[in-house]
Amino acid sequence: MIDVIKGWFEKHFSDPQAIILVSFLVLGAILILYLGKILTPVLASVVIAYVLEGLVKKISLCGAPRFVSFLICYALFITALALILFGLIPLVISQLSQLISDFPKILDKVQQLILTIPERYPMLDAREIEKMLGNFSSELVGVGQQLVSVSLSSAVDVFTVLVYLVVVPLLVFFLLKDKEKILQWFRRFVPEDRSLAYSVWKEVDVKMGNYIRGKMLEIVIVGVATFIPLKYMGMNYAATMSLLVGLSVIIPYVGAVAVTIPVAMIAWFQWGASSDFVYLMIAYLVVQFLDGNILVPLLFSEVVNMHPAAIIIAVLFFGGMWGVWGVFFAIPLATLVQAVINSWPSIQKTTEA
């Protein structure tokens, strides 16, 4: 048994480059796993700077100096941040407050609907209906209490959010402005012979950058495309529902199904089984169809080349480890794993043989 383990280890880890690559991956995982909460503003800044760097390069290719390209991209980032802070967030908070205040009415409407079930379906046991009503009511009351507690706890975290709003833009500014200086400083602490790690990163860099930029663009497009019909038809909480639909694209396959439930429920509570409800659901499903069959293939045709089962497993695994960050970066991290496997020395030798 020992000889088998020793032979396997020598086969896969005899190359010093493999040890260096594993060390990088383990160190990065440890930092995120144990210091993720502390480093949240730093991680957010790195992601934003990484996304903006792609735009900086594209503007620079048009002939503009890097500093000018950097200023243009940073100005766009600050403008987008201001629109979110002073436009979208106050509207969503107002609608969430309205949803919490309307929650007793929604609960009463659900109870009335359940009470009409024995009249429509006499074969059902009335006692079972009453029991179901009691359980459902207690569950909804629990949900309402959770909504209130979340709103109160979020108010306590206002100071933390304000700190992030100052720290993150500053970090993004310096990460973009002094990119080469920062990278040169990091190179001092890594071995000079890092060709394997560099080849893996070169393969992942293009896919990861395109995926993150494409996913952010998809969130905006899907959110706006959903908001237009919801607002036009006068649906309650249109901005909040559109934001949820936009963010749902972060979770492949599962997100679209999960977010359809609150959209349909709120539309039904507002209009009942009417033509307005049908028209709104048709418009919503059209947006989902266009996203899945046109927008996603256009944005990610050359980025994600993995089986759907592998994507779902990656979302569950990395989401369980790192929460929201893990869900967002599940596909890029799965791409990283795939690139490491493809570039591993022993696998390359076996393929060449």
Image: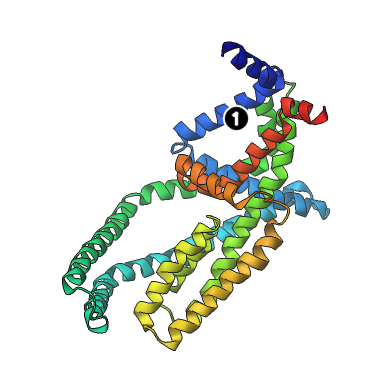
The quadrant in which the N terminus is found is: top right
What amino acid is at disc 1? Answer: Leu
Residue positioned 27% across, 74% down in the render: 110
Q: Report whether residue 151 is seen.
A: yes
Left-right relation of 344 to 243: right
Q: Residue at x 38, y 84 (%)?
A: 273
Query: Between 235 and 296, which is closer to the camera in this rendering?
Result: 296
Residue lying at the far top in this picture: please name it: 3
Q: Position of residue 293 (x, y in %)?
A: 65, 67
Question: Which residue does the image show at 47% across and 83% down from the upper left?
Answer: 278
Q: Nearer the viewer, residue 12 or 178?
A: 12
272 sits to left or right of 276: left
User: Up-down: is 226 above or below 298?
Assistant: below
230 vs 159: above or below: below
Left or right: residue 278 compared with residue 139: right
Q: In the structure shown, which secondary structural element does the residue marked by tag 1 occupy?
A: helix
- Kindly identify which residue carries mark 1: 25
What is the residue that sits farthest to the bottom in this orientation? Answer: 275
Residue 141 place in picture, x, y as percent: 23, 63
